[in-house]
Amino acid sequence: MKSLLYSPIFGITLTLAAYVVGLAIRNRTRNQFANPLLIAMLLIIALLKTTNIPYAAYTVGGDFITMFVGPATTLLGMIIYEQFDYIKKNWLVVVVGSTVGAITAIGSVLLGIKLFKLDDILGYSLVPKSVTNAIAIELSRILGGAPSITVLAVLITGLSGVATIPLMTKLICPDDPVAQGLAIGASSHLIGTDKAAELGKVQQAMGSVAICITGLVTVILVALLF
């Protein structure tokens, strides 16, 4: 039994099963707060705690899945390619909007660090909260933060964006798919882009390109500021 728990099969199977359950709950409830990723995370935590299965056993397979975060992120290129002509027509809005989003995200963290007197590890862990995990984890390590805290911050940022941005875009830019996609992608990365796909292909493409540009600008800002 112990050999099975510490094999990659356990962590991979548990992760996939929890995510499938999360998808089923979202599809059944149609609630914007019923995010499959969040549900899967809570289910895995609950199972590990109630059964006293060591976290180290889960990470043998869980870390294997994490290896695919980077390659999966590159698939955004296909979405961007399909709407490339539309993006090209709005390139200035895309670049400026994504850049402002990255500056605002880092600026808000720096302000929070100063106001709440956060220690260095926590502060550095929160700096890359608004970019996708593939970039955020590496930036956190470079800065000297805790990647586990960064992953949680990225998740919370994405989920809060999914919960609030659709309402905000309806109030501010209800007929502008470009602005909607950029707002979602620049502030809530991959989790938000999944939501943008429900709004339309243009929103999804704009969200995808915003993730790329916001990530690039964030890397540059981190290099300049830290």
Image (cartoon, rainbow, N blue to C red):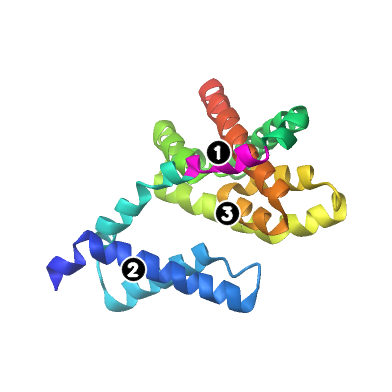
Q: Position of residue 34 (x, y in %)?
A: 59, 70
Front residue of 13 and 53 = 13
> Relative to 167, is 4 on the left or the right?
left
* Segment colored magenta: 73-83
Circle 2 is placed at which residue position? 14
Q: Are marks 1 and 2 in contact (CB under 8 Å)?
A: no
Quick one: SS at disc 2? helix
In this view, the residue farthest toward the top is 224
> Relative to 94, is 110 on the left or the right?
left
Q: Are marks 2 and 3 in contact (CB under 8 Å)?
A: no
Please indicate, yes or no, whether residue 191 appears anywhere in the rendered image. yes
Quick one: SS at disc 3? helix
Could you say which quadrant of the image residue 89 lies in? top right
Report the residue at 72% width, 57% height from top. 199
Circle 3 is placed at which residue position? 191
- Which secondary structure class fits the magenta region best? helix
Question: Real-space Cα distance between discs 2 and 3?
Answer: 21 Å
